[in-house]
């Protein structure tokens, strides 16, 4: 059943909800205890995930893998302590990372600027009697506000925007887009709950991950916004489509541990067991998102059937980003285009196109301008080579793309573009033949040529003067850079052999 809300316009000023002091610990739907009462210190002192089980409607188990979470503060949106890189338990490896206590003190409030933190703390203490709808606008810097005026531009520099927002690009961008579409008013979203949800989402993206972090989520969200504005799609989208599409982009890699699915499987990680080695990361991202939606009660005012339906649609979109399903989705997309039987007035077809849009947004880095594309390549390679170093250290088979001694950035990028990106974006251009599609294909071609030129220069340099092992152009490949999923493609294997779990982006 398709739902399209046409609710009364929300007043600009609303009283502070009585439950704004809700705790942010493990979720509990037990009728014997108050959800917003004082938490039991024994329950909050240490945990490895927020677990919720709603016995009233036989809801499945939801798990958010957040590492060891310390006791929350009772006042203010103070962020959870930043999770150390790879702060997850691998039974066969033991501890792979340092203590979270080693993080510099200056990063305690990284997620919120000092001004924003004081503002939110005053709100939570109930000092102001009214909450303005445009809560974040007061804190935008001039530069960030100017950039948001061009948020639909394909040249949008998310790295610069993240600096202007003091590391809060995901929160700021998402709130702006939801407000711009009028979804805050239309769905009568509580501004404080929305603020808590976005802060907690950004916290749950491990900032220590070079690639799978909140900036990547913000970049994917911006790309998703661009795709949803395309004429072939925008005129058919309902308010629910817009809300679910944006939420899926925001949470599509939520809680990503910085390693891929094969690593979780071969180290007997509990997530691999929980999801039976199938779309492990994608299922984890989805359940994490649902856990946060329920913990913040962002959609609790909607009818239960509608909110559960939204959760299912959210999962369907996130699960579509599994790279191991790339061929299946691409083949289905190509068949629809060949037969010209897409009817976007039907919710089923519209949802499928949203799935394809999110898949494009998730791997659109090679289609960005060279300066942005190259930065993403460097970051994703750093993350994967770090995984390879861990696998070598513990005598595990090194995953494809993760061996810094056998992969070079140029070869990896060219293979990724040829076997993964070009086929997908060529079909997307058939569906939406617009200036944006041609721009993306143009950048893709130029970037591919640029990587080829860099490869040629490295080979020429290596032939003239032997390079030291580990140096650029040498046998060690040194600081070679890559996008996940590319090295395998370079060797001519199928996309199913690529690292799973959003590995390509």
Image (cartoon, grey):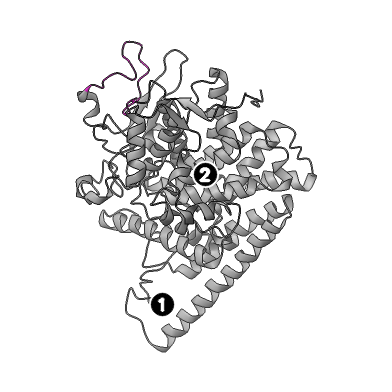
Mark 2 crowd level (few <14, some 14–19, many ≥20, 10 Å Cα): many
Would you place residue 453 above or below residue 168 in this image? below
| Residues drawn in magenta | 21-40
**Crowd band around label 1 with a 10 angstrom C-alpha radius: few (<14), some (14–19), many (20+):** many
Residue 293 in view: yes
Overall secondary structure of the magenta section: loop
Judge whether residue 26 is colored magenta: yes
Which quarter shows the N terminus?
top right
Q: Is residue 329 magenta?
A: no
Tell me what residue is drawn at x 61 percent, y 52 percent. Answer: 152
Tally of numbered tags: 2
Question: Circle 2 sits on which residue?
Answer: 322
Q: In which quarter of the image is residue 381?
A: bottom left
The residue at 68%/43% (across/down) is: 332
Residue at the right extreme of this rendering? 340
Among numbered discs 1 and 2, the one appearing first in the sequence: 2
Give the vertical position of 305 relative to 4 (above or below): above
| Badge 2 element | loop
Q: Are marks 1 and 2 in contact (CB under 8 Å)?
A: no
The picture quadrant where one finds residue 407 is bottom left
Label 1, label 2: how far apart the Cα atoms are: 32 Å
Residue 262 appears at what percent x and percent y? 40, 47
- Pinpoint residue 202: horizontal percent, then vertical percent: 40, 42
Task: Give the residue drawn at x 68%, y 57%.
Answer: 437
Residue identified by numbered label 1 = 473
Residue 317 location (% of width, % of height) = 56, 38
410 and 219: which is toward the camera: 219
336 relative to 395 in the view: left or right = right
Asked whether residue 326 appears in the rendered view, the answer is no
Residue at the far top: name it. Answer: 32
Q: Nearer the viewer, residue 333 or 315?
A: 315
In the rendered image, residue 92, in percent from the top left (x then y), is placed at 26, 44
């Amino acid at each position: 059943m398709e739902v399209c809300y046409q609710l009364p316009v929300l007043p600009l000023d609303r009283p502070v909800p009585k439950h704004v002091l809700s705790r942010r610990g493990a979720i509990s739907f037990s009728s014997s205890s108050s959800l917003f009462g004082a938490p039991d210190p024994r329950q909050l002192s240490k945990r490895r995930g927020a677990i919720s089980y709603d016995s009233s409607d036989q809801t499945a188990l939801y798990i958010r893998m957040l590492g060891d979470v310390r006791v929350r503060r009772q006042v203010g949106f103070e962020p959870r302590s930043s999770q150390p890189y790879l702060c997850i338990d691998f039974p066969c490896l033991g501890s792979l990372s340092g203590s979270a206590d080693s993080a510099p003190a200056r990063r305690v409030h990284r997620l919120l600027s000092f001004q924003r933190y004081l503002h939110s703390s005053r709100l939570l203490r109930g000092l102001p009697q009214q909450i303005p709808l445009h809560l974040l606008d007061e804190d935008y810097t001039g530069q960030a506000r100017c950039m948001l005026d061009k948020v639909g531009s394909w040249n949008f520099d998310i790295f610069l925007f993240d600096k202007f927002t003091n590391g809060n690009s995901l929160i700021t961008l998402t709130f702006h887009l939801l407000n711009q579409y009028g979804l805050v008013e239309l769905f009568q979203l509580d501004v404080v709950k929305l603020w808590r949800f976005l802060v907690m989402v950004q916290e749950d993206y491990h900032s220590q991950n070079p690639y799978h972090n909140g900036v990547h989520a913000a970049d994917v969200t911006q790309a998703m916004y661009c795709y949803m504005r395309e004429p072939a799609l925008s005129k058919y989208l309902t308010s629910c489509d817009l809300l679910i599409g944006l939420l899926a982009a925001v949470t599509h890699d939520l809680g990503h541990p910085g390693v891929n699915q094969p690593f979780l499987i071969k180290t007997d990680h509990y997530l691999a067991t929980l999801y039976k080695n199938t779309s492990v990361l994608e299922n984890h991202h989805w359940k994490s998102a649902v856990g946060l939606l329920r913990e913040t009660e962002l959609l609790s005012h909607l009818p239960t059937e509608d909110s559960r339906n939204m959760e299912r649609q959210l999962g369907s979109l996130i699960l579509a980003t599994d790279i191991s399903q790339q061929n299946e989705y691409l083949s289905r997309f190509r068949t629809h285009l060949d037969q010209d039987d897409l009817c976007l007035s039907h919710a089923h077809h519209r949802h499928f196109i949203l799935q394809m849009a999110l898949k494009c947004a998730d791997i659109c880095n090679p289609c960005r301008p060279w300066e942005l594309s190259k930065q993403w390549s460097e970051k994703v390679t750093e993350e994967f080579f770090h995984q390879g170093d861990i696998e070598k250290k513990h005598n595990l088979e090194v995953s494809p793309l993760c061996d810094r001694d056998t992969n070079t950035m140029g070869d990896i990028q060219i293979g990724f573009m040829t076997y993964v990106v070009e086929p997908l974006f060529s079909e997307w251009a058939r569906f939406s033949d617009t200036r944006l599609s041609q721009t993306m294909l143009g950048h893709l071609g130029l970037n591919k040529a640029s990587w080829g030129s860099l490869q040629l220069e490295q080979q020429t340099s290596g032939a003239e003067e032997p390079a030291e092992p580990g140096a650029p152009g040498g046998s060690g490949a040194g600081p070679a850079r890559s996008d996940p999923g590319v090295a395998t493609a370079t060797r001519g294997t199928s996309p199913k052999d690529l690292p799973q779990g959003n590995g390509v982006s």
